[in-house]
Amino acid sequence: MIFRRSRSAEPQTPASPTSGAGENGYAVQIVRHLYQDLLKREPDHDALAACVAWMGRGATIDDIKTEIIGSPEYRERVSGHPIAKFPAIYRPERISYFTHRGRFRPLAISIETVNICNNDCVICPYSIQTRKKQGMDMAVFAKVVADYAALGGGSVTLTPMVGEVLLDKQLLERLKLLRATPAISRVSAITNATMAYLYTDEELAELASYFDRITVSVYGLDAEEFALMTRKDQYDQFMDSLGRLIRIFGVAKVGLGARHLRARTVDEIDAWLADVAQRAGVAPSLLSLPGTRTYANWTVFDTSKPLPLDAEWMPPQRNTEQCALPLVSLQVLSSGQVSFCGCADFDGKTALMLGDIRDASLAELLGSERVNALWDWQGCGVPEPCKGCSFYMPISKLNDLHSAFSNPIGTFGG
């Protein structure tokens, strides 16, 4: 086997593979870098020669990396990895997505840059949060980005846990920082769109140049439904803003997701989409509106109290299998507090909190005993806020969602 370490000699830099120049020398550098990065050692003579020869026959850097990750030595080195206990997920072709230099990392990161919202939706705990409503300090944001880049980077969503991203007064500055960070591969956000009126067309166009994707939450297809959902009378403003966003960002960058209170026919949805298309100056066939009328309990809502009109709470459940969602993303709240869960820890006061990004790096927080315990429901018990959470998804379901590893935000939204 290429990656079995020699028993007869200490690691050394052999003469034969490095004796050539050009492509051969480049291959040696690549193999040595991968060994040092993944196995924390120099390659043995035979392993280096075999890898260089393999690359000469057409193997790619990813081929070499996958082979190292699948080796017994690497598996032994990361045996303390919290995901290793889930063999259906902890497979050689997937490990690199949630591992950096042998240590656990989530597939993506959610950064809540503001926890202030213009709406007060009946399905959202915004009005019952007790933490300070604020924008994230720019120095804190910069540290989060730098720490995430040090973990390998990847996708970033600026969707607040509870809040509206367009109310972030430093949004453009943050987007520029993300663009200037090579490790950041994708930037997205969910918005209610209404507050786009705060921006000129030119300012929205500049924002659009930095986002890969935005998704607009549609809280009603008429003024009555919108007011019942958001407890605000801003439907006309929302529709005007939505048309502007689609026109300026372009249909390829804007997704729509309806949060219905009223059951809607296909004809009603099509008529609404035609109105939006006319405002945006695009063909109705380019727009679609997936949606739902069932809502999560956020671990705090009394689901025995009915929602307005035809909407329903998700049925009560008892969660026992490890949840997959902390693998998808962690959440950094506007205060700098870091939550293990990117979905439901809206007030930052549960057993899922890991600490403050100002006091420790993301690597330190993710490598803590706290994280190991939270990844061990079987041994340490199900955390209290997770027991009945209706955002829950068992980790075994990830096995069928292959895109979740390479495109977590695109798969789950955000």
Image: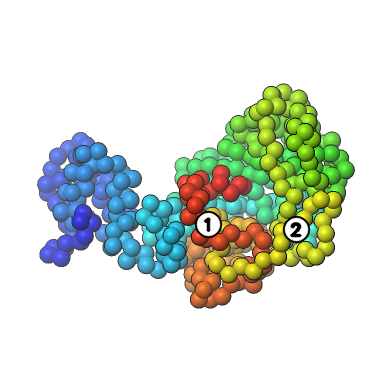
Give the left or right position of residue 135, taking residue 74 as reference.
Answer: right
Q: Amino acid at mark 2?
A: Trp
Q: What residue is pinned by disc 2?
A: 313
Mark 2 falls on what kind of element? strand
Q: Position of residue 262 (x, y in %)?
A: 81, 46
- Specify few, some or many for label 1: CA neighbours under 10 Å numbering under 14, 14-19, or 20 or more: few
* Nearer to the camera, 341 or 163: 341
Image quadrant where residue 173 sits: top right
Question: Of label 1 and label 2, which has the lower sequence position?
Answer: 2
Where 377 sits versus 3, above or below? below
Q: Residue 413: percent from the left, percent from the top?
A: 61, 47
Quadrant of the image containing the N terminus: bottom left
**What colour scheme does the image use?**
rainbow
**CA distance for labels 1 and 2:** 22 Å
Tag 1: amino acid? Lys
Residue 102 in view, yes or no: yes
Quarter occupied by residue 46:
bottom left
Horizontal placement of 132 versus 111: left or right?
A: right
One can see residue 139 in this view: no
Near mark 2 (Cα within 10 A), the count class, few <14, some 14-19 or many ≥20, is: some
Determine which of the numbered discs, if any, sits on residue 139 in the image.
none
Residue nearer the viewer, 134 or 79: 79
Q: Residue at x 77, y 33 (%)?
A: 267
Front residue (pair 411, 32): 411
Q: Residue at x 84, y 44 (%)?
A: 225
| Residue 397, numbered label | 1
SS for dot 1: helix
Position of 393 with respect to 116 (left or right) is left
* Residue sitting at x 73%, y 27%: 277
Q: Is residue 285 above or below residue 302?
A: above
* Residue 2, image x, y percentages: 21, 54
